[in-house]
Image: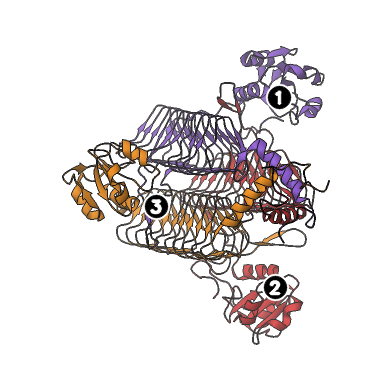
Chain colours: A red, B orange, C purple
Amino acid sequence: MGADSRFFPARGPFRLADIADSLGARLVAGEDREISGVAPLALAAAGDLAYLEGRRHIEALRGTRAGAVLLGEEAVGIAPEGCAVLVTATPQLAFARAAAMFHPRPAPQPGIHPTACVAADAILGEGCEVGPFAVIGAKAEIGPGCIIGAHAVVGAGCVLGAGSILRAHAAMEHCLAGAGVVLHQGARVGNEGFGFVTTATGEHVTVPQLGRVILGDGVEIGANSCVDRGAGGDTVLGPGTRLDNLVQIGHNVRTGRGCVIVAQVGIAGSAELGDFVVVAAQAGLTGHIKVGSKARIGAQSGVMNDVPPATDMVGSPAWPARETLRAFARLRQLAATKRDDKTGGTQ
Amino acid sequence: MGADSRFFPARGPFRLADIADSLGARLVAGEDREISGVAPLALAAAGDLAYLEGRRHIEALRGTRAGAVLLGEEAVGIAPEGCAVLVTATPQLAFARAAAMFHPRPAPQPGIHPTACVAADAILGEGCEVGPFAVIGAKAEIGPGCIIGAHAVVGAGCVLGAGSILRAHAAMEHCLAGAGVVLHQGARVGNEGFGFVTTATGEHVTVPQLGRVILGDGVEIGANSCVDRGAGGDTVLGPGTRLDNLVQIGHNVRTGRGCVIVAQVGIAGSAELGDFVVVAAQAGLTGHIKVGSKARIGAQSGVMNDVPPATDMVGSPAWPARETLRAFARLRQLAATKRDDKTGGTQ
Amino acid sequence: MGADSRFFPARGPFRLADIADSLGARLVAGEDREISGVAPLALAAAGDLAYLEGRRHIEALRGTRAGAVLLGEEAVGIAPEGCAVLVTATPQLAFARAAAMFHPRPAPQPGIHPTACVAADAILGEGCEVGPFAVIGAKAEIGPGCIIGAHAVVGAGCVLGAGSILRAHAAMEHCLAGAGVVLHQGARVGNEGFGFVTTATGEHVTVPQLGRVILGDGVEIGANSCVDRGAGGDTVLGPGTRLDNLVQIGHNVRTGRGCVIVAQVGIAGSAELGDFVVVAAQAGLTGHIKVGSKARIGAQSGVMNDVPPATDMVGSPAWPARETLRAFARLRQLAATKRDDKTGGTQ
């Protein structure tokens, strides 16, 4: 079963040989076969293309009904008879590209919905789609081919690069964004950060938050995630950085290129991440720390200090992963000792 | 003091004997008494019905001014004089039903608000209420008696069963939902999941997310919670499953019947939960694991492996609760040992 | 570089002597200098006022190009030549006030946007600004000088005090709010809490949630945060309490004055916080506990029991901070012991 055509109308069908050509994959028989969609191994039917990456789904490959499968050289013999095989070094990447042949990201339907509220001095590039009840503020500049979804808000003075998308209920303010940026539903970009000074009598006095948010090309912000604007100076997410849902980014955080921030992570103010840092789900980073490029932070970790490049950290407070896993094993063993043996406590 | 009539207009008053009848409770005197509302023991006045479940509020019972109280057989003698008593094996459940007699969930006010934006080929059942600035997409099918709140969005092609409710700013896309489903404010259902492949040069290439979200009858999604659609195949929440606020559900997660997912929990892609699983607040489940029916996951736990049915897990990484509590006690004791005693380290 | 004038139009310039006067700071030379904005030390130019608090940025002070700097008596000699110095005991607070001289919070632009949907019997005070697609329900009462942002929703019967602000997509229902309250983007106040009773057959029956939310003067609720209304009785946030983004507050929680609740914290139902409690990011508090005034809860902590006043707690489960840090150090040391030494386990 391929994708539900109510939600994902498909292009095609395509000849398998043409698909192999586009993907740069080597086709093992079946070049005339027509393929009409993509599906996971376990759900694919005779008209579908599937893929195998790694060994997790090898049983699913043996039993698949897919018409064709993308896989690595080492798995060529495993596909069932009748299933055509496309060999590639990167099956999942090839699958992503094949899926986009059948189901390209919907292009903007150019036009401004009659209910949208667009400031007279806002500038919209060619071919933009502006949905119902969208609000575009004064002097905002939106590049060509953008989609501004239902109820989305682009604040006064914001800049949004070509081919960007704001999904329903997303909002940006005080923000300069590059091309190909995506804000998923309910994303909040450019809000006032959590900045105040507490007086001797306990009154919290707001420090005016006078910075911006700068989003590099291709940045994606997940549903209901929040990226606060800088207090002074800017909050910056480098090109290609992706945030999952419900992520919190404090004021003046900076990330390099291609960082991956998984769901429900929180990064406190002025933390700096290098390039290609991965922060797994529900982890927290304290403010004013530096995390080196290609560091990886484990799920639910609590990082309180600088992290060197290419280092894996886990735990709360976070330690280097190798050391921590050894310590966990040892503590588990110690915890199993009896209260009254020689290792007993001070009581 | 009962409920604020500005927000909760009340039916009634009702005779206590009639209330007892409806609830199947045994009335101990006071059948002619009129009751005009419900309230907690500590706040109830002479016209109010309250309840006692368990022993937590037994002092509040002794001091209550409630006109009547629902309680179990074992507590009959404790209520103060002048307070009528309704005996039942399930006082809180009876209270919930009594509260709904006085304050039923507001029925839809049939009609489409003039500002709402409803596609010409969308199908709405009888008696639906569609609020201001609601957006209903092409070919969406909405069952009878639904409430689509202010600014709520029902995406193109979505199906929503009878008597369902979308509160303000809720949105669903790529979703087939059963009857009696509730999306609270700002809930996001059917967004693109966090699916991409990273190339050798560090570029993140989106894997088209071609699945749906399937919500069983009576599913409730809390405020600002997110349920991503499947990558291929579907994300499925079984009938009666309830999510609290700010919960994250990754693509292709599946739950059985009646699961309870408390606030700020995150469940990563392709995890599978059986029936009646309880996941307490801020816990995280890693992807591709199976959690057996009636398992219970403690608050802030981090579950990295399969969990057998009816098992309690706590900690991060999570262990079975009994073992963990013992280990914690032992570690606390070990931690209290002195650095220089016989258990000393390697230094 | 001061603030981007596209987003933050500035008042001024002001004479430095006048700024010093307003702030009650002592000016060390340069009284005729004109200052046109504020900026952090590292970004400030000749026309900008900056500040130094504590010792973190002392190198930035030595290298700053700021025209003037606010600092404490102890740092007077450190500012570079040509940089005027304003001495004060509270540099950051003085800076906040100076920043507000140049960039006061934008005043409401009185008027109701033609697209807004305001109930005929709602009451709006003088000088309110109501943005596009805002919805104000029946009999709502909004004090003078409020800003109701784009797409914001004020539910029927709500009361909102003078000078309050709802930013884009914020919503309040069943809520009585004081003066100077701020709901940031996507904040959800007054939703139904997570209250239900589970029957013997596993059905979850909703307990009608019949309480309200009471917000004291000056309360701020961060972007996409959720404050559930009371189940019976009210959820109450005391005056001056501030919530960061993505915070969850359960039904019937009560806080005192001036509490600070950092991003992604969750506080379960009926917990009670005293005055000036600080809960750091991603911490969780279980229901029905009491946290004393001026207690401080560490990031990612899990608090399961009452906390005495003025106590610091860390860890999950949380212990007093001093004890925990000692225990962590000891456990780290124990974890470094070898498996086969005298402290070995039971195997």
Q: Nearer the viewer, residue C306 or A221?
A: C306
Q: Image quadrant for the C terminus of chain A?
A: top right
Which residue is identified by label 1? C51
Q: Is residue A240 left or right of residue C111?
A: right
Picture disc at residue B287: none
Crowd around label 1: few <14 · some 14–19 · many ≥20 (10 Å): many
Judge depth for marks 2 and 1 and give the one in front: 2
Picture disc at residue C196: 3
**In this orientation, does residue C4 appear?**
yes
**In this orientation, does residue C119 appear?**
no
Helix, strand or loop for disc 2: loop
Looking at this view, name the residue that lies furthest to the left: B32
Which residue is identified by label 2? A55
Residue C308 position, x and y percent, is 55, 33
Judge depth for marks 3 and 1 and give the one in front: 3
Looking at this view, name the residue that lies furthest to the bottom: A81
Q: Amino acid at mark 3?
A: Phe
Helix, strand or loop for disc 1: strand
First-in-chain label (3 vs 1):
1
Q: Is residue B22 left or right of residue C242?
A: left
Q: Nearer the viewer, residue A189 or B34?
A: B34
Q: Quadrant of residue A325?
A: bottom right
Helix, strand or loop for disc 3: strand
Residue B337 position, x and y percent, is 71, 43
Q: Nearer the viewer, residue C318 or C294?
A: C318
Residue in view at x 35 percent, y 57 percent: B146
Q: Amino acid at mark 1?
A: Tyr
Residue at mark 2: chain: A
